[in-house]
Amino acid sequence: MRAVAAVTLVLALFAAGCAGEPEADEPLVIDEAASSAPAPSATPSPSLSASARPSAEASTDDKGTAVVVGAMPSGRAQLAAAEAYVDYLKVRSEAFNTVRLDLAALSSVAVGDALQSVQSGVAYRSRKKLHMVGGLEVDVTDVSVRGRTARLTACLSNSTAEANRKGRIVEQDPPPFYRGTADLRRFGPDVWLVSTVDYHEVTGC
């Protein structure tokens, strides 16, 4: 029973599928630099451009969270969608590490359920006094583009874990691999935003 509970906890933490708002004594921290930005919506700002998003190279902060890029597709539209997915994972990882919600950064990479997933994940970690450490290596294995939508599959080599406020790791044996899937919507020639995400534990990919 303990093993089953541990696996369930790990999947819930990684996928950030925990809904709800922070408790009153643990307010959700919103980045002050983004506090003046409009509330996220299903329609991105008309001024949004591909250059406004984070770089698709490895992103690491001073606490050691990182997203490292592996294999990527070669077609222009497929590559643009894959880079948008990587950008989303970077914003997500930083939010889960710092337990701060940068609305401007999040709105530049996500809409709909994918955006709400990060909001819920930050709220959950704030409430539980946790933060994510470690990193991911992302290999995008398939991107199917149809008009203004895309479907993406990726292998995520996982070295993330949840730590408490003292820095102590509180989950045991986090799964080493996930298969990530995502739906994306195109809002410009090379501007893709992630709309839905899912993660499935696998033994290897």
Image: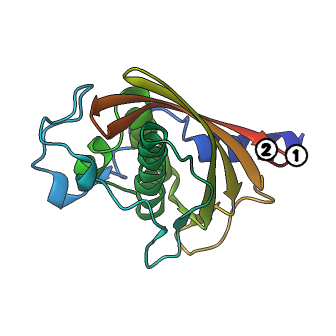
Q: Nearer the viewer, residue 176 or 101?
A: 176
Residue that sits furthest to the top in the current view: 147
Residue at the spot of label 1: 3
Crowding around mark 1 (Cα neighbors within 10 Å: few <14, some 14 to 19, many 20+) is few
Circle 2 sits in a helix, a strand or a loop, which is it? helix
Q: Indicate the quadrant containing the N terminus: top left, top right, bottom left or bottom right.
A: top right
On the picture, is 70 further left or further right than 33?
A: right
Circle 1 sits in a helix, a strand or a loop, which is it? helix
Quarter-of-image position of residue 44: top left
Rendered position, 98 above or below 145: below
Where is residue 22? Give x, y as percent: 39, 43
The answer for how far apart the CA atoms under marks 1 and 2 are is 6 Å
Quarter-of-image position of residue 167: bottom right
Where is residue 135? Give x, y as percent: 60, 64
On the picture, is 121 further left or further right than 54?
A: right
Color theme of the render:
rainbow
The amino acid beneath tag 1 is Ala
Where is residue 102? Give x, y as percent: 28, 53
Rendered position, 187 above or below 86: above
Where is residue 83? Give x, y as percent: 44, 49
Rendered position, 87 above or below 57: above
Residue at the spot of label 2: 7
State yes or no: discs 1 and 2 in contact (Cβ < 8 Å). yes
Q: Residue at x 27, y 25 (%)?
A: 42
Q: Residue at x 34, y 32 (%)?
A: 111
Q: Nearer the viewer, residue 183 or 135?
A: 183
Q: How many marks?
A: 2
Crowding around mark 2 (Cα neighbors within 10 Å: few <14, some 14 to 19, many 20+) is some
